[in-house]
Amino acid sequence: MLTAEAIIDIAALQHNFKLLHGKCPRAKVAVVIKANAYGHGAVQFAKALPEADAFAVSRIPEAIELRNAGIKQPILLLEGCFCVDELKSASALGFHTMIHNEQQLKEFESIKADKPIQVWLKIDTGMHRLGISPELVAAYYERIKASPNSYDEIGFASHFYNADELDSDATTQQIKCFEEATKGYSGPRSLSNSAGVLYWPDAHYDWLRPGIALYGIVPRVESTGAEEGLRSVMTLKSKLIAVREHKKGEAVGYGHNWVASQDTCIGVVAMGYGDGYPRTAPNGTPVLVNGRKATIVGNISMDMITLDLGLNAQDKVGDEVIFWGENLPVEEVALHIGTLAYELVIKLTGRVKKTYTN
Ligand SMILES: *Cc1c(COP(=O)(O)O)cnc(C)c1O
């Protein structure tokens, strides 16, 4: 019996790509598929999106994996190259690289690349994680431009830190800062992650960089992908391996952290933190069993989760349990667990079988 399975809907991914690109059809799209496409499968996603203008990842092995799989589009290294060898690979394999500090610039100047490398200058507009300060743009730009390793055109990028909050003016400030820092340059500009694409039309510029929204998930915790017209891409499910009568006053599982307040049935499902379902999920976290909502009770085990199915439940061994998907938004589950949907989808382990459907 097949148990833990993630059904990944490629048609939904393609729908989401079109919807996001439709927010700014003149812009190009660098589809963010770092961390194995947030756990969904980077190679499968890259192959399913031939219209993408580029793909973006965080580590050079991720970029190399895509090239080896036959992906032809440019691949952007979001944090740039971490050493000279990576720069040489970027030149040989056609990766775009960010430059965000002096060390990266020096290494870029020091090599003799066989082919030029497309550089994006990363500007810190307020996140204070990566990027050069806006005052340094002119100096960096001149040095990059003077290097034979660079193409004539240099891109400009920055990243939002709060764009999922629609009523904070942090994002307006960041857009203003980016606008001023890049004024007068002709190179392409890129500012928008998913939140920027969805909520901040002034931030679209020349290249969009959506990640999470492609997977049908919105970055705002109060909302769901469906509210934005996005379709859920991943359905996580497994099966009941036991259904047991349970008496009022009895507890269940390690630590006995839940006690039944009335007679009920407990369903035991083949899923646990060994599959990547978080051990921190509290009593009351929802799942779907035979189309209705039930709740998790007791501590999450490595291989099993216990559910309160209710008195006289008709559910049987082998019945399907859905942990998130179209009718149970992963954002809602994340809210119960106190994490982000990003982390839930990314953390599934190799024991969960991935099945791609169209
Ligand atoms: C991860 C990342 C993105 C995509 O962010 P989402 O919130 O998933 O859309 C865009 N740009 C950079 C620099 C990133 O690191």
Image: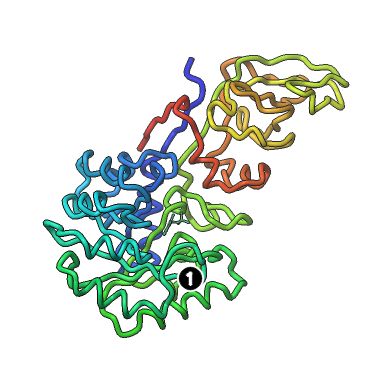
Horizontal and vertical percent position of residue 128: 51, 66
Is 18 rendered above or below residue 296? below
Q: From the image, which quarter does the C terminus lie in?
A: top left
Figure colour scheme: rainbow
Residue 263 occupies quadrant: top right
Residue 254, position as x, y percentages in the image: 73, 22
State whether label 1 is within 8 Å of ligand 1: no
* Residue 190 in sight here: no
Locate residue 228, reporting x and y percent. Answer: 51, 58
Asked where in the image residue 30 lies, by quadrant, the reply is bottom left
- Tell me: 14 left or right of 90: right
Q: Where is residue 60 in the image (x, y as percent from the top left)?
A: 31, 47
The kind of residue on which mark 1 rests is: Trp
* Residue drawn where x is 21% and y is 72% of the image: 153
Q: Where in the image, quadrant-wise, is ligand 1 located?
A: bottom left
Give above or below for 342 relative to 281. Answer: below
Residue that label 1 marks: 200
Secondary structure state at the residue bearing disc 1? loop
Which residue is nearer to you in this view: 310 or 17? 17
Identified at 54% across, 56% down, the residue is 219
Front one among 259 and 257: 257
Q: Residue 194: tell me if it is visible.
A: yes
Residue found 61% across the figure and 28% down from its top: 290
